[in-house]
Image: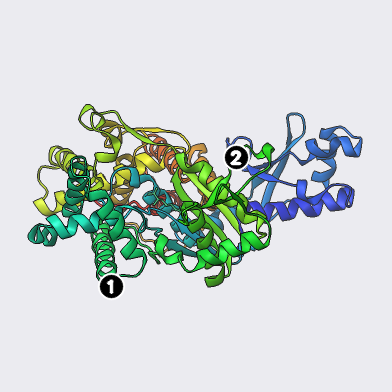
Amino acid sequence: MKLITDIVTDILTKAVIESFGDTIDKNEIAIQFTKDINLGHLQTNIALVSSKKLLKNPREVAQLIIDNISTGEVIEKLEIAGPGFINFYLNPKFISLYINDFNPSSWTYDLDIEQGTTVIDYSSPNIAKRMHIAHLRSTIIGDSIKRVYKFLKRKVVADNHLGDWGTQFGKLIVGYKRWLDKDAYNENSLEELERIYVKFEQESANDETLLPEARAELKKLQDGDEQNKALWQDFIDTSIKEYNKLYKRLDVEFDTYWGESYYFDSMPLVIDELISKNIAKESQGALIVEFDESENLHPCLIRKSDGATLYATSDLACIKKKMETYDLNKLIYVTDDRQSDHFKQFFRVSEMLDWNVNNIHVSFGLMKFADAHFSSRKGNVIRLETLLDEAESRALKIVEEKNPDLSTEEKKEIARVVGIGAVKYSDLSQNRSSTFVFDWDKNLSFEGNTSPYLQYVYARIQSILRKADFDNSIKQDLVFSTEIENKLVLQLTKYHSIILKTAETCKPNIIADYIYELAQMFNTFYNAINIIKSEGIEKHSRLVLINKVADTIKSGLDLLGIEVLDRM
Ligand code: ARG
């Protein structure tokens, strides 16, 4: 199967070659969906962009191209519009076949897609601390990109690059040995680790022996002391166990949990390579990589004068390790934009090393709260768990008002799907580059560009289909006579191109915008036309159409990691 844009591009390309040979560069031939069905389904500006070279006026060029396109199976009609656009109207028979076969939830196109493995590094919290809302965006944006890549049948590895190394472990070990409450640790390990960490900070303000003790414990750990290593491993295991509870709630899964420590063995190799290739140099006892002034980047610190390695060193070692492990094509890192310079630095170093990998930093702005209760606390102290609990309990209140007759269990399940969905959608529907304001009332509203609205439209379509006893297995030629039906058809045909664009830009809001527009079109259609009362082939066509609309909403939401329900 082929994308509609590809089918029409092929037809157009043939005609352009027949008209002008290779005077026109094939790469300039582009087809776009129209915004308005009254301009046909697709449009090209090729006549406009090539008219200069051909020394002809654009409308004349357009006419010469059109003369070489025969209408029929795929194209019903062609038109020249405005200064020289060519508009394509698809044949209703072709549309009927297309819509009958349209399966939004699977990728059936034989495109020459990316080769090699893409590793997506996301969530990546620092061990021994509970996850805070600051981790939310990375976790769900990364997960959505992973879903899109999987959908496109690309090879993808989801990696959780845990912060499992650093000075905090010396302090934790001291705290553990001195103050640990075993029962509390068994009950809620991360809470207890946080408590002893805070206690360490408090106590060390008055007790000067504590910091040196922590440094000594850290050194023992780094030198391979059995007891300290066992403790450190326990902190990691225990943290991952806690994180997994949240990941499960968010329906997020990882293939690997390779923390910073995983790359130790590769670090000396990277340092050797940097030195032997004359890329890194000594500066006041430290090892650094300097950049050209034009790059406007601070030097990248590789090794401190005391021999300690740094964040960038482990990230470079991480690339090396991944190149050895996979037939690596791309590395995508999802973090907030405060780390942008760090990524620019080691990406540049990786280029200087001639490493053949495409590094991409998918960055995002911070999340703020509109609501006083949450905004009065600093972002880093709102726990992710608290946020999710709050979302579900607010959703439950709404469900209780709307549907008091449902069983407690049903209400809870709806509240879970609506609550978690609302949190995810509020984030993913924003252009990730900007800061976004989290607003409970807006996110949980059943109106506007929200997840509850989309879930509700989905459930409403299911209820219409039930009422109409719709039989999905009947295959008949479809007819779409009204403008709004044809708008819906046009919107559906865009779906798979939208997913490709999302993968290209790593911007899930493209999918969100698309399904929101689709849902609004459906509502216009639903308000204008009584589907249940229509008859014969018209009724069947309309039911098929709304069934595909529902499937598309479901598939789009799934790519955002959001569930739907048949009844709400
Ligand atoms: N652990 C880091 C943090 O919490 C994020 C790691 C991102 N990934 C990476 N390869 N640097 O800020």
Q: Is residue 205 visible?
A: yes
Which of the two discs, 2 and 1, sits closer to the camera?
1
Q: Report whether 529 appears left or right of 48.
A: left
Residue at left offset 41%, top offset 35%: 524
Q: Is residue 392 visible?
A: no
Vertically, is 314 above or below 82? below
Say the numbered circle drawn on residue 297.
Answer: 2
Q: How many marks?
A: 2
Colour scheme of the rendered structure: rainbow
Q: Is the residue marked by circle 2 packed among few (<14), some (14-19), or many (20+) residues within 10 Å?
A: some
Residue 324 percent coordinates (x, y): 55, 71
Vertically, is 301 above or below 244? above
In the image, 93 versus 161, the foreground residue is 161
Residue 230 percent coordinates (x, y): 26, 70
Asked if the residue at tag 1 contacts the one at tag 2, i.e. Cβ–Cβ closer than 8 Å, the answer is: no
Residue 458 percent coordinates (x, y): 33, 48
In the image, 397 versus 106, the foreground residue is 397
**Type of amino acid at the residue the image marks with label 2:** Leu
Q: State whether label 1 is within 8 Å of ligand 1.
A: no
In the image, 473 versus 196, the foreground residue is 196
Dot 2: what SS? loop
Say the numbered circle drawn on residue 382.
Answer: none
**Mark 1 highlights which residue?**
226
| Quadrant position of residue 445 | top left
Q: Report whether 18 appears left or right of 419.
A: right
**Distance Cα–Cα, label 2 vs label 1:** 41 Å
Q: Quadrant of the N terminus?
A: bottom right
**Type of amino acid at the residue the image marks with label 1:** Glu
Residue 448 percent coordinates (x, y): 35, 33
| Farthest left residue in view | 183
